Amino acid sequence: MNYNITFEAWLELSIFPIIKSLLIEPKKGKKASFCIVYDVFNP
């Protein structure tokens, strides 16, 4: 199992959509995206 490919895929699927939502909808997306990130890094 190649960790780098897995991690890049995870970034692409999880982090990039959050960043896009922050850029596209800063008012609506900011709080929700922060909660998603918090849940991901603090299970």
Image: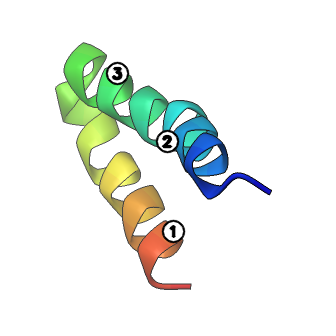
Judge left or right: residue 13 versus residue 29.
right
Judge left or right: residue 30 versus residue 35.
left
The one nearer the camera, 13 or 38, is: 13
> Which quarter of the rendered picture does the C terminus lie within?
bottom right
**Residue 36, image x and y in percent?**
47, 58
Residue positioned most to the top: 24
Q: Secondary structure at mark 1?
A: helix
**Residue 32, image x and y in percent?**
39, 50
Q: Which residue is mark 1?
A: 40
The one nearer the camera, 39 or 11, is: 11
The one nearer the camera, 36 or 25, is: 36
Q: Which residue is mark 3?
A: 20
> Which quarter of the rendered picture does the N terminus lie within?
bottom right
| Residue at left offset 66%, top offset 48% | 6
Disc 2 vs disc 1: Cβ atoms closer than 8 Å?
Answer: no
Of callouts 3 and 1, the N-terminal one: 3
**Image position of 15 with respect to 22: above or below:** below
Of callouts 2 and 1, the N-terminal one: 2
| Residue at left offset 31%, top offset 57% | 34
**Residue 5, image x and y in percent?**
63, 41
- Label 2 and label 1: CA atoms lie apart by 12 Å
Q: Amino acid at mark 1?
A: Val
Q: Amino acid at mark 2?
A: Leu
**Of circles 2 and 1, which is in front?**
2
Of callouts 2 and 3, the N-terminal one: 2
Residue positioned most to the bottom: 43
Q: Secondary structure at mark 2?
A: helix
**Of circles 2 and 3, which is in front?**
2
**Image position of 20 with respect to 34: above or below:** above
**Image position of 38 with respect to 23: above or below:** below
Q: Which residue is mark 2?
A: 11
Residue 27 is tagged as none
